[in-house]
Image (cartoon, rainbow, N blue to C red):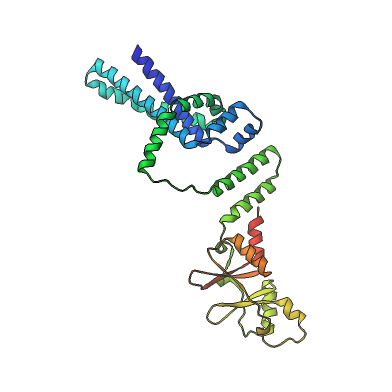
Amino acid sequence: MKDFFIIGGCWAISFLFNGIEAGLTSIDPVRLRHHVKLNRPAAVRLDRLLKTPERLLVTVLLITNLADILALFVMTRFLVSRFAATGFFLAVLVALPVYLFVLSVLPKSLFRRFPFRALSLLARLLEIVMTALWPIVATGKLIGRLFLPAQKKRARLFAAREELKQITTQSEREGSLTATERAMIHNVVDFQNVTARDVMKPLSRVASLKPDSPIEDVFRVSRSTGFDRLPVIGANGDAVGLVNVVDILLDRDHPQSISRYIRRMVTVQESEPAARAVQRLRAARLGLAAVVDQKRNLIGVVTSEDLIARLVRA
């Protein structure tokens, strides 16, 4: 009877801490911070524990593994004492479904559905267990530092962006933001990962001029494309500059060639962030930039209108 109590107790502990492990990876940080601001004791305690996530996770895994090993050892010893060598086979037959489904899949599924509620109820227990096992965890951490080199901490910029998106999604659910406002904020956040290549028009789709093109070609191409700024591309395929139709209209002399109206053109790398391309165009007060590859070959053009449209599209 004693063995049954030990096995049942270990399985209950394993069930609980397997669920806690899943809950720690599923908890919504936005919701947690909201409850912390409301000064709810369980949320404050849980937030304090999550300040050291490595220590918390190691403690949970340590308890889970110890409970699993002890239960398996006691069950195997009991079955072997009753059925001799056959007891080993029976132990595997019983342990396999219990450990795979009852103690793994079931608790993790339950805690992933209600992570905040479950962890709030168990925050006090976690605090006690972490305090009790602190010497063991600290010793293991010290040994790990002796054999493993320390890694530099990475910036949490990406995590901060994802948290901002979660905050706006939660605000939309609560009615503080409209769907359009939420989508625009998400687009601004995601715009940091957009490159010039993602927004540019390929060179094959670009209506361009040659350095010696006549003035009539400028008006013809402008009427057919609807653009008032046109790139000028040389015979070798390099971007010479751009021509603004407005400059020609304001000039009373009207020379035969466009060479007089060619302005300098901003050049951006294809891998350059689109946000930086916007800044460079604004600084140069130009609306068109040439996009080049790593070998400085012209592969397309990007306009400020295309960049802004990509930024604010919903």
- Nearer to us in this view, 148 or 57: 148
Q: Quadrant of the N terminus?
A: top left
Q: Is residue 202 above or below residue 95?
A: below
- Nearer to us in this view, 19 or 137: 137
Where does the image place residue 131, in percent across and percent down from the top left?
47, 27
Of all residues, the one furthest to the left in this rendering is: 85
Q: Residue at x 55, y 30 (%)?
A: 46
Q: Is residue 270 above or below residue 60?
A: below
Q: In the figure, residue 78 lies in which quadrant?
A: top left
Where does the image place residue 25, in percent across and percent down from the top left?
50, 36
- Nearer to us in this view, 93 or 53: 53
Where does the image place residue 224, in percent across and percent down from the top left?
67, 74
Q: Residue at x 53, y 24 (%)?
A: 124
Where does the image place residue 6, in percent across and percent down from the top left?
37, 17
Q: In the figure, residue 258 lies in which quadrant?
A: bottom right
Is residue 107 visible in the rendered structure shown here?
Answer: no
Q: Horizontally, is 310 left or right of 126 in the view?
A: right
Q: In the figure, residue 285 lies in which quadrant?
A: bottom right
Q: Residue at x 52, y 81 (%)?
A: 236
For the image, the number of numbered tags is: 0
Q: Is residue 123 above or below residue 30?
A: above
Q: Residue at x 26, y 20 (%)?
A: 87
Is residue 142 visible in the rendered structure shown here?
Answer: yes
